[in-house]
C-alpha cells in the first residue's frame, strides 16, 4: 500500500475518484450542475497534478521523489490544516451554543477529533 500512495499517479487518481463521488452525491441530491462543477474542479486538479511534473512543489505533493524535507513539509502542513480545522469546529460549536442551538454537528466533530487525538497520542507514545 505504501508504494501505491507514493506513486505519482495516486494524487491525480484520487482527485478524479473524489470528483466522481462528489458528482454522484450531488446528482443523488438533485443538483447535477453543482456535481458537474465539483467534478470539473477536482478532475482539473488531478490533471494539473499529473502533468505538472516539472514543478518541484507538485512532485512533492504527489509524493514521487520524497525525502525527509518533503515528509517534514507534509507533516507540518497536515498539522497546520488540522489545527485550523479543529479551531473552526470549536468556534462554530460555541457560536451555535451562544445562539441557543445544540451545536450539532460541530460538537460531534469536536468530540471525534478529541478522541482521535488522545488515541493517537497514546499509541504514538508507546511506539517510540
Image (cartoon, rainbow, N blue to C red):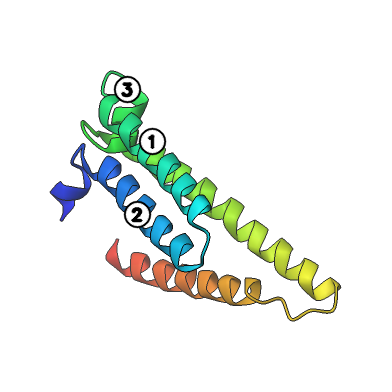
Residue at 30% x, 52% y is 17
Instruction: From this view, report whether residue 108 is shown above or below residue 48.
Output: below
**Is the C-beta separation of discs 2 and 1 under 8 Å?**
no
Earlier residue among tags 3 and 2:
2
Left or right position of 44 against 95: left
Q: CA distance from mark 3 to mark 1?
A: 19 Å
- Residue 50, by quadrant, is top left
Question: Which of pointers 2 and 1 lies earlier in the amino acid sequence?
Answer: 2
Up the image or down, 22 lies above or below 44; here it is below
- Secondary structure at badge 3 equals helix
Please name the residue that numbered disc 1 is placed on: 44
Disc number placed over residue 56 in the picture, else none: 3
Instruction: Name the residue tied to disc 2.
Output: 20
**Picture residue at 27% right of the left edge, 26% below the top:** 51
Q: CA distance from mark 3 to mark 2?
A: 28 Å
Looking at the picture, tell me which residue is in the foreground, 30 or 111: 30
Residue 63: x and y in percent read 26, 38
- Residue extending farthest right: 99
Amino acid at each position: 500500500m505504501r508504494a501505491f500512495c507514493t506513486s505519482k499517479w495516486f494524487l491525480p487518481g484520487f482527485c478524479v475518484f473524489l470528483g466522481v463521488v462528489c458528482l454522484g452525491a450531488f446528482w443523488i441530491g438533485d443538483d447535477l450542475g453543482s456535481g458537474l462543477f465539483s467534478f470539473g474542479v477536482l478532475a482539473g486538479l488531478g490533471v494539473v497534478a499529473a502533468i505538472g511534473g516539472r514543478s518541484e512543489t507538485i512532485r512533492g505533493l504527489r509524493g514521487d521523489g520524497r525525502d525527509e524535507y518533503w515528509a517534514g513539509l507534509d507533516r507540518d502542513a497536515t498539522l497546520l490544516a488540522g489545527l485550523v480545522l479543529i479551531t473552526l469546529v470549536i468556534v462554530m460549536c460555541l457560536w451555535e451554543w451562544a445562539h441557543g442551538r445544540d451545536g450539532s454537528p460541530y460538537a460531534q466533530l469536536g468530540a471525534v477529533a478529541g478522541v482521535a487525538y488522545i488515541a493517537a497520542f497514546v499509541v504514538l507514545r508507546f511506539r517510540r
